[in-house]
C-alpha cells in the first residue's frame, strides 16, 4: 500500500509542473495505474487524486484535460462514496460556468461518471445518491433559459442517465417531467429534440400515472392548435414515447388517433412525416388496440404515398410502353428539372410507405384486403423517382411476399417446382397466393425496366424482391423469363457494377434455375453463358443447374469450367463450385464430352487426394457414378479411387465417412462389372469398425454397401464371416436397432443368404442370430441380451425364411417345439413366439391348428413376457392369414374375458397392419364386438378398444365416421369418452373432427381435450378453422371450479381434492401445443390472460405455464411486455415462497423445482432488451441480484443448464 501511495504522490507532484508534457505524461501514468485491478488507495490518496484530477479539468492544455476525463472512469470504482460525490458536485458546478471550454469538459466528465456507476446490488446506494445529486443540479441547469448551451448539455446528460439508470431516479421522475415539458416549446430546435429524447428514456420506467400525465399534456397542448413548429415537436414526441413506452400508449389511442389524423391535413411536409412515424409506432407497439383504426391509417398511407406535388409521372408511364433498351440518361436529366432542394415531399412518401410496411408485417390476418388495396398501390409506386423511397417500396412489397409465404407454408401450398403456376389447384390454394399469382405480370412489367437502371440500390432492391417472389411462388416467373434475362445479363456484364451487385444478380438467377423448368432458359443460353466468363463462385453455382439442358452451348460452359477446375491458385469456394459444376456436366452430358472425359476424370482423382477438396470430389464422383448415362467409363480411375476411398473410412470426419460410403455404394451398384474382388479389399477391411451401435446412421449406410456387394460382387464377401459379420450380429442384438438401420440389415440378410457364399448358409445365419437367447439361462435381460433385440432378431429370422421358402416348414416346426419345450429358457420361448408371428405375417403358416393351440397355451403361461409375445404373434399371424385367424381371434375375445386385454392387442395389430380392402368384409363383426366392450370398467381396456375403433373407422371413413359421431349423443359417459378417444386415432386426413368440449361429463371433456391436443400437434391444419368455436370452451376449462373441489377426511386430517385438476391440465397442455402449431389463430393478449391465471394455480399447472411464458417471450415479446406488470407478481410470489418448517422432503423438492421453473421464465423475460424498463420487473431483477438464494438459482438456470434447453420442451404427441 505504501509503495502505491508513494508512486501516486510522485505522479501528483509532476501534475503540478509548469511543463505541459510533464503534466500529460503524469496523468497518462496515473490512468494506467488506476486501470489495474490490484490497485487500492488509502483515504488520503483518494482525496488527493480526486482533487488533482478536478483541477486538471481546468488545465490550459486540451490534451491534459481529455486525459483527466479518461481518468475519472476507472476512478469511480476505486474510491469511496464521498469522493465520488465530490467529483459530481464539482463537475455539476462547472457545468454552469461562464467558460465554455470548462462546461464542455465537465459535461464529458459527468457522462463518464454516469457510464461507470455500478448497477450491481453492492453499488446501488452509491448510484442512487450520485443520481440524486446530479439530477437536482441538472433540473436547475435546464431552467437557465438565457444560456442554450447549458440547457443542451444538461439535457444530453439527463438522457444518458435516464437511459442507463432510470430505476434509481424513480423519486425524481415527476420533477423531471415537470422540467422537461416546458422545454418542448423552446424556440431552439436542438433543445426541443433533446427534450424529446430525454422523455423517450423516461417513459419506459415511469409510473402509469406519470405516463398518463405526459400523454394528457401532449393531447391538451395539441388541442389548443399551437404553431406548426410546436405541433411538429409534440407529434414527434408522441411517436418517440410510443416507441419507447410500447403498450402503455394503447389505452390513449382513442384520443390520439383522431388528433394525429387531423394534423395530416396540415400543409406541412415535416409534420406529415412525424404523423406517419407516430402511426408506425402505434401499429408496431399496439397492434390489437390499433385494429379499429387500421382502415383509416391505411387510407391515409395510400393517399400520401403518392404525394409528389413537384413531379408529373404521366410521361414516365407512357415511356414504360417503349422498349426497355432505351437509355435512361434523358429521364435522369428531366428528373433534375423538377427536383428542388427544399422539396420535402419525399419524406412524407417514405414515412407513409414505412407505415404500410408495419401494417403488413403485423396484421397477417388482413392479407387478403392488403392484396386488393395495398398491393396495386405499391406496384404503382415502383416508378418512384427518389431512390431511397423506391428502396422502401421494394422493402414493403417484399414484406407482403414474406407474409404470404409464412401463411402458405403452414398448409403446404407453395407451388411445386416445374408445375404450371397458372393452373394451380384452386380448391387447395390459399386465396392470398391466388391473388398474388394474378399480380405477377404487373410486378414483372414494373420491375424489368428498372433492372437496367444505373442506380445500383434500385437494381439490388429489384433482385431481392424477385428472389422473394420466386421463393413464394416457385415456377410463377416462367412466362416472364425473356423479360428478366436482359436485366440479369446487364448486371453481370456492366463494368460499373460492384461485386455485391453481381452476387445479388447471380443469387436471384440461382433461385430462378432451381424453381423453374429447364426448358424456359433454353432460348437464352448463348447470352447467359457469355455473361458468366468474368464471375467466379456464384457463376459456377448457376451452370450446375443448367447442365441438364444446355447441350447446344456445352463447349462454351465446359471450357470456362475446365479452366477453373485446373487452376490451383484460386479461392477454395471457387474450386469446390468448379468441381461440382463439372460433375453435373459429366453426369448429364458425359456422352458429348468425347476424349475430354478421361482428362476430367484424372483431375477429379487428383482433387480426391487433396485434403481441401476431397469431400466435394467424393460427392461429385457419387453423382457421376449414378449417372443415367450408361456410357461413362470410369475404369481408368476406378481401382485407385476405391483404394483412396477405403482410406477415407479411417478418417475421423463423419461427413467424409458418410459421403465415401454413399460413393462406394453408387460405384458398386452401377460399375460392378469393372470392379475386381481384390479392389474391394481395402474397403472391406475398414467396414468392421463402422458397423457399430455408437453411430447407427453410419452403420446403416455401411450395411447398405454390404448389401450392394452381396448382390453385385458376391465373391468379394468370401471372408466376411470373420470380419464384418460378427459386428452385424452385435448390431442385431443391440437394443438401439430400429428403423432404417434394421431395414438395411434385413435386406443384407436376404442378399447374403441368396448369394450362396460359402459358410454363410441359411442354417449358419439362423444359428448365429438365435444362439444368445438359448445360452441366457434366466430371463430376457439375464445374459446380456436385451428385450428390445428379440423383436429385431424375429424380423431377421422372418427375412431369412422368406428368402428361402423351402426351409420355412422345418424352421416353423423347430419354433413350435421351442415354445412347447418346458426346458427352454424364457427368452428362447419369447423369441420363438415372435419369430412365429413374423413368419406368419407373410402368410407362410396358413390356418395351422397346431399354431393356434401353441398360442392359446402360451396365454396360460405365468410369464407376462411370454403372454405379451403370444399376443403380438397372434396379431401378426392374423395379418398374414386373415380369413384363417381373424374369426378365431374374435371368438376368443368374446369367450375369454380374462384374456381380453391381450387379445385386443392382437386385434389392434390386425387393424393397423391390414389393408382396407382385406378388412372390409370383417368390419361389421369387429365393430359390433368393439362396441360391446367400450363400457369396460378398466381404463386400459377402454383405451385399447378406442384405438381399435379409431383405426377401424379409417377403413371406410365415409360410412363409419357418421356412425361414430352418433355414438357421442348416446350411451354412458364411459362409452362417450371411449368414442372421443377413438376419434383421436382417426385424425389422419379427415376434413372434419368432432369435439365434445361442452359435454356434461368431466371425463368426456378431458378426453376431448386430449384428442384436440393430439390433433393440434399432429394435424394442425384440421383444427385451424375450428379455433373460433373451440377456444372459448378451451379457455373455460382453464378456470378453477369451486364446485369440483371437495374435502376428504383421512383420520384426524382433512385433505382437499380437486376433481377439475386433470381437465385444467389437459386444457393448458392444449394451449401449449397451440403456441407451436396455430399461433397466428390466437389472440395472444387473451391467451396471456389465461396463462396469468395458470401462474397462480396448482403445482402441475404452474410448471406448464412457466414453460408457456418462456415460449411466449420468444414468439411474441411485444405482447408479453404489454402484460408484464401483471405477470411479474405471480413469478415473484413463486420465487420467494418458502416451504413451512417440518414439511416432508417431497414438499421441499417440489417447491425447489417450481422455483427453478419460474426462474427459467424470469431468465427468458430478462433476455428481452426492453424488459427492465418496467419498474416492477426492474425491482424484481434487483431483488434476485441482492438475494443470495435467488441469485444462485438464477445463475444455475442461466449457466449450468443453459436456459431453456431441449429438456424443457414438452412432448405433446
Image (cartoon, grey):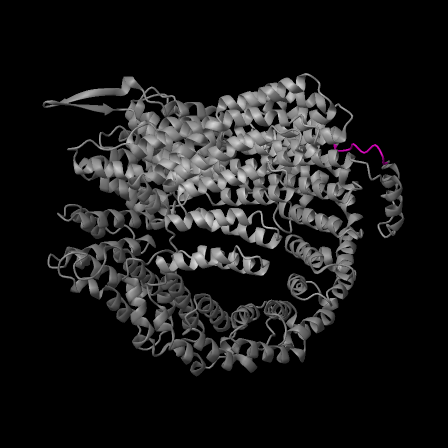
- Give the image quarter of residue 701: bottom left
Looking at the image, which is closer to me, 377 or 518?
377
Question: Does the magenta portion include 790?
Answer: no
Magenta stretch in the rendered image? 305-311
Give residue 942's position: percent from left, percent from top.
27, 33
Image quarter hosting the C terminus: top left
Looking at the image, which is closer to me, 570 or 309?
309
Looking at the image, which is closer to me, 305 or 275?
275
Image quarter hosting the N terminus: bottom left
Give residue 1051's position: percent from left, percent from top.
9, 23
Question: Where 742 falls versus 919 (above or below)?
Answer: below
Looking at the image, which is closer to me, 663 or 956?
663
Asked if one can make out residue 386 in the rendered structure from this viewpoint, the answer is: yes
Asked if one can make out residue 1026 in the rendered structure from this viewpoint, the answer is: no
Which residue is found at the position 60% from the left and 78% from the top?
Answer: 603
- Give the image quarter of residue 887: top left
Residue most extreme to the front: 18
Amino acid at each position: 500500500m505504501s509503495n502505491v501511495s508513494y508512486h501516486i504522490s510522485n505522479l501528483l507532484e509532476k501534475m503540478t509542473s509548469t511543463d505541459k508534457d510533464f503534466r500529460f505524461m503524469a496523468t497518462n501514468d496515473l490512468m494506467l495505474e488506476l486501470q489495474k485491478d490490484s490497485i487500492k488507495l488509502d483515504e488520503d490518496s483518494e482525496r488527493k487524486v480526486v482533487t488533482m484530477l478536478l483541477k486538471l479539468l481546468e488545465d490550459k492544455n486540451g490534451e491534459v484535460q481529455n486525459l483527466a476525463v479518461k481518468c475519472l472512469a476507472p476512478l469511480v470504482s476505486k474510491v469511496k462514496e464521498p469522493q465520488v460525490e465530490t467529483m459530481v458536485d464539482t463537475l455539476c458546478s462547472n457545468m454552469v460556468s461562464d467558460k465554455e471550454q470548462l462546461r464542455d469538459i465537465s459535461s464529458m466528465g459527468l457522462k463518464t461518471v454516469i457510464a461507470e456507476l455500478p448497477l450491481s446490488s453492492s453499488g446501488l446506494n452509491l448510484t442512487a445518491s450520485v443520481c440524486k445529486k446530479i439530477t437536482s443540479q441538472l433540473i436547475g441547469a435546464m431552467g437557465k433559459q438565457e444560456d442554450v448551451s447549458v440547457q443542451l448539455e444538461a439535457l444530453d446528460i439527463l438522457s444518458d442517465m435516464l437511459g442507463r439508470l432510470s430505476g434509481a431516479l424513480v423519486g425524481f421522475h415527476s420533477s423531471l417531467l415537470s422540467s422537461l415539458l416546458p422545454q418542448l416549446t423552446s424556440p431552439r430546435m436542438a433543445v426541443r429534440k433533446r427534450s424529446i429524447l430525454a422523455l423517450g428514456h423516461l417513459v419506459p420506467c415511469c409510473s402509469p400515472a406519470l405516463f398518463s400525465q405526459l400523454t394528457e399534456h401532449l393531447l391538451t397542448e395539441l388541442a389548443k392548435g399551437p404553431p406548426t413548429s410546436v405541433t411538429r415537436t409534440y407529434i414527434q414526441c408522441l411517436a418517440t414515447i410510443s416507441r419507447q413506452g410500447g403498450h402503455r400508449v394503447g389505452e390513449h389511442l382513442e384520443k390520439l388517433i383522431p388528433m394525429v389524423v387531423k394534423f395530416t391535413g396540415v400543409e406541412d411536409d415535416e409534420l406529415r412525416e412525424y404523423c406517419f412515424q407516430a402511426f408506425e409506432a402505434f401499429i408496431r407497439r399496439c397492434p390489437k388496440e390499433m385494429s379499429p383504426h387500421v382502415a383509416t391509417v391505411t387510407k391515409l398511407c395510400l393517399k400520401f404515398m403518392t404525394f409528389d406535388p413537384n413531379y408529373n409521372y404521366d410521361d414516365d408511364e407512357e415511356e414504360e410502353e417503349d422498349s426497355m433498351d432505351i437509355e435512361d440518361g434523358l429521364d435522369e436529366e428531366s428528373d433534375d428539372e423538377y427536383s428542388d432542394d427544399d422539396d420535402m415531399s419525399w419524406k412524407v412518401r417514405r414515412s407513409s410507405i414505412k407505415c404500410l410496411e408495419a401494417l403488413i408485417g403485423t396484421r397477417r390476418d388482413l392479407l387478403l384486403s392488403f392484396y386488393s388495396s395495398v398491393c396495386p398501390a405499391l406496384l404503382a409506386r415502383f416508378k418512384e423517382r427518389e431512390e431511397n423511397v423506391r428502396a422502401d417500396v421494394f422493402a414493403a412489397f417484399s414484406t407482403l411476399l414474406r407474409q404470404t409465404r409464412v401463411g402458405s407454408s403452414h398448409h403446404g401450398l407453395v407451388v411445386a417446382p416445374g408445375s404450371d403456376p397458372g393452373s394451380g389447384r384452386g380448391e387447395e390454394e390459399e386465396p392470398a397466393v391466388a391473388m398474388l399469382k394474378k399480380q405477377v405480370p404487373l410486378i414483372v412489367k414494373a420491375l424489368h425496366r428498372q433492372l437496367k437502371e444505373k442506380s445500383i440500390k434500385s437494381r439490388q432492391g429489384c433482385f431481392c424482391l424477385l428472389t422473394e417472389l420466386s421463393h413464394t411462388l416457385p415456377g410463377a416467373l416462367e412466362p416472364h423469363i425473356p423479360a428478366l434475362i436482359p436485366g440479369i445479363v446487364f448486371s453481370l456484364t456492366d463494368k460499373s457494377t460492384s461485386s455485391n451487385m453481381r452476387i445479388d444478380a447471380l443469387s436471384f438467377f440461382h433461385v430462378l434455375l432451381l424453381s423453374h423448368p429447364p426448358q424456359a432458359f433454353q432460348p437464352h443460353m448463348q447470352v447467359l453463358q457469355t455473361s458468366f466468363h468474368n464471375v467466379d463462385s456464384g457463376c459456377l453455382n448457376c451452370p450446375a443447374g443448367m447442365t441438364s439442358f444446355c447441350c447446344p452451348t456445352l463447349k462454351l460452359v465446359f471450357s470456362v469450367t475446365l479452366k477453373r477446375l485446373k487452376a490451383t491458385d484460386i479461392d477454395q469456394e471457387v474450386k469446390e463450385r468448379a468441381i461440382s459444376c463439372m460433375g453435373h456436366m459429366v453426369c448429364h452430358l458425359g456422352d458429348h464430352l468425347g476424349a475430354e472425359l478421361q482428362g476430367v476424370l484424372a483431375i477429379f482423382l487428383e482433387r480426391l487426394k487433396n485434403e481441401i477438396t476431397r469431400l466435394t470430389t467424393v460427392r461429385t464422383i457419387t453423382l457421376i457414378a449414378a449417372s443415367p448415362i450408361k456410357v461413362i467409363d470410369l475404369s481408368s480411375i476406378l481401382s485407385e479411387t476405391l483404394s483412396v476411398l477405403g482410406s477415407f473410412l479411417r478418417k475421423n470426419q463423419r461427413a467424409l465417412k458418410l459421403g465415401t460410403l454413399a460413393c462406394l455404394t453408387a460405384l458398386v451398384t452401377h460399375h460392378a462389372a469393372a470392379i475386381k474382388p481384390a479392389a474391394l479389399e481395402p474397403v472391406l477391411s475398414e467396414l468392421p469398425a463402422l458397423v457399430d451401435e455408437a453411430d447407427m446412421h453410419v452403420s446403416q449406410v455401411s450395411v447398405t454397401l454390404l448389401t450392394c456387394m452381396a448382390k453385385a460382387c458376391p465373391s468379394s464377401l468370401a471372408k466376411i464371416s470373420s470380419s464384418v459379420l460378427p459386428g452385424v450380429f452385435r448390431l442385431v442384438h443391440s437394443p438401439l436397432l430400429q428403423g432404417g438401420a434394421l431395414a438395411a440389415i434385413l435386406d443384407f440378410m436376404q442378399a447374403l443368404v441368396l448369394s450362396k457364399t460359402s459358410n454363410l448358409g441359411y442354417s449358419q445365419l439362423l444359428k448365429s442370430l438365435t444362439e444368445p437367447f438359448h445360452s441366457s439361462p434366466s430371463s430376457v435381460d439375464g445374459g446380456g441380451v436385451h428385450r428390445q433385440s428379440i423383436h429385431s432378431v424375429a424380423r431377421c429370422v422372418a427375412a431369412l425364411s422368406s428368402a428361402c421358402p423351402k426351409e420355412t416348414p422345418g424352421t416353423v416346426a423347430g419354433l413350435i417345439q421351442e415354445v412347447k419345450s418346458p426346458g427352454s429358457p424364457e427368452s428362447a420361448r419369447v423369441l420363438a413366439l415372435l419369430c412365429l408371428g413374423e413368419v406368419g405375417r407373410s402368410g407362410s403358416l396358413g390356418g395351422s391348428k397346431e399354431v393356434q393351440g401353441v398360442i392359446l397355451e402360451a396365454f396360460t403361461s405365468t410369464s407376462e413376457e411370454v403372454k405379451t409375445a403370444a399376443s403380438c404373434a397372434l396379431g401378426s399371424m392374423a395379418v398374414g392369414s386373415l380369413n384363417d385367424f381373424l374369426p378365431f381371434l374374435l371368438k376368443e375375445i368374446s369367450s375369454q374375458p380374462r384374456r381380453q386385454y391381450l387379445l385386443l392387442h392382437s386385434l389392434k395389430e390386425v387393424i393397423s397392419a391390414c389393408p382396407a380392402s382385406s378388412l372390409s368384409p370383417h368390419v361389421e363383426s369387429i365393430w359390433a364386438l368393439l362396441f360391446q366392450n367400450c363400457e369396460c370398467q378398466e381404463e386400459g381396456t377402454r383405451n385399447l378398444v378406442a384405438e381399435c375403433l379409431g383405426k377401424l373407422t379409417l377403413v371406410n371413413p365415409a360410412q363409419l365416421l357418421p356412425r361414430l359421431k352418433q355414438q357421442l349423443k348416446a350411451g354412458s359417459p364411459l362409452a362417450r369418452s371411449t368414442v372421443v378417444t377413438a376419434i383421436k386415432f382417426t385424425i389422419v386426413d379427415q376434413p372434419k373432427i368432432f369435439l365434445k368440449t361442452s359435454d356434461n361429463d368431466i371425463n368426456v371433456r378431458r378426453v376431448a381435450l386430449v384428442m384436440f391436443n393430439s390433433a393440434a400437434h399432429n394435424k394442425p391444419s384440421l383444427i385451424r378453422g375450428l379455433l373460433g368455436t373451440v377456444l372459448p370452451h378451451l379457455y373455460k376449462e382453464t378456470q378453477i371450479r369451486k364446485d369440483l373441489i371437495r374435502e376428504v377426511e383421512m383420520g384426524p386430517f382433512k385433505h382437499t381434492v380437486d376433481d377439475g385438476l386433470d381437465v385444467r391440465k389437459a386444457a393448458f397442455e392444449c394451449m401449449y401445443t397451440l403456441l407451436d402449431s396455430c399461433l397466428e389463430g390466437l389472440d395472444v393478449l387473451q391467451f396471456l390472460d389465461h396463462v396469468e391465471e395458470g401462474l397462480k394455480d396448482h403445482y402441475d399447472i404452474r410448471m406448464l405455464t412457466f414453460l408457456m411464458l418462456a415460449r411466449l417471450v420468444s414468439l411474441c415479446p411485444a405482447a408479453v411486455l404489454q402484460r408484464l406488470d401483471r405477470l411479474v407478481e405471480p413469478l415473484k410470489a413463486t420465487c420467494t415462497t418458502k416451504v413451512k418448517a417440518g414439511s416432508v422432503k417431497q414438499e421441499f423438492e417440489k417447491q425447489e423445482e417450481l422455483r427453478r421453473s419460474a426462474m427459467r421464465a424470469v431468465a427468458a423475460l430478462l433476455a428481452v432488451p426492453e424488459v427492465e424498463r418496467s419498474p416492477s420487473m426492474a425491482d424484481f431483477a434487483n431483488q434476485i441480484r441482492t438475494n443470495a438464494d435467488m441469485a444462485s438459482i438464477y445463475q444455475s438456470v442461466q449457466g449450468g443448464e443453459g436456459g431453456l434447453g431441449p429438456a424443457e420442451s414438452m412432448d405433446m404427441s
